[in-house]
Image (cartoon, rainbow, N blue to C red):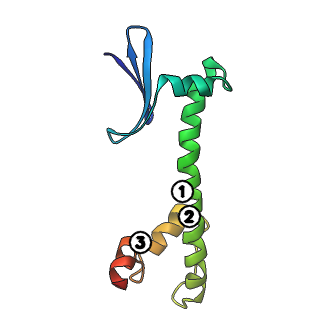
Amino acid sequence: MPMERSGILEVLYNVNFKVSMKLQIDGIEIFELFPWQEKVIKNDILEKEFETHMKQIARWVWEQKFQRCFQRFENEWLPKLRDDPAISFIPADREAFVNLVLSRPDYKNRTQRDAHEI
């Protein structure tokens, strides 16, 4: 069964009949959209735009997750950095900001914080 790969979405084809659309991350199937479900979505979305639309939705979900996590990260760490007399410069660039925080000895990720609370 030949496969067409694009990003994190994998669409399986059998002859010229579409079998299903699957969402995979690192080769692990996370979600499968069955043909009947696809037909329901195509009731609202043009057939020619379906795959692009589904990829956009997947990307949007990941971007929104990152944006919310970054907002909480920034809200937690900006006050701490401003109050630290050893910090003379807080980068405006997101990646530089994250790297500054991650390099601090008082930084703990969620797993480390939870383990510390036990």
Proximity of marks 2 and 1: CB atoms separated by less than 8 Å: yes
Residue 79: image location, x then y, percent:
60, 83
The Cα–Cα distance between marks 2 and 3, rounded to whole angstroms, is: 14 Å
Quarter of the picture containing the C terminus is bottom left
Q: Which of 57 and 63 is in front in this view?
A: 57
Specify whether 118 is left or right of 106.
left
Badge number at residue 1: none
Whichever of callouts 1 and 3 sits on the residue coming sooner in the sequence is: 1
Q: Please tell me whether mark 3 sits on a helix, a strand or a loop.
A: helix
Task: State the residue position of label 1.
Answer: 66
Task: State the residue position of label 3.
Answer: 110
Q: In which quarter of the image is residue 81?
A: bottom right
Q: Which of 107 and 2 is in front in this view?
A: 2
Q: What residue type is labelled 1?
A: Phe
Q: What residue type is labelled 3?
A: Arg
Whichever of callouts 2 and 3 sits on the residue coming sooner in the sequence is: 2
Residue 75: image location, x then y, percent:
61, 74
Task: Identify which residue is drawn at 58% across, 39% down.
Answer: 57
Q: Which amino acid does label 2 sit on?
A: Phe
Badge number at residue 70: 2
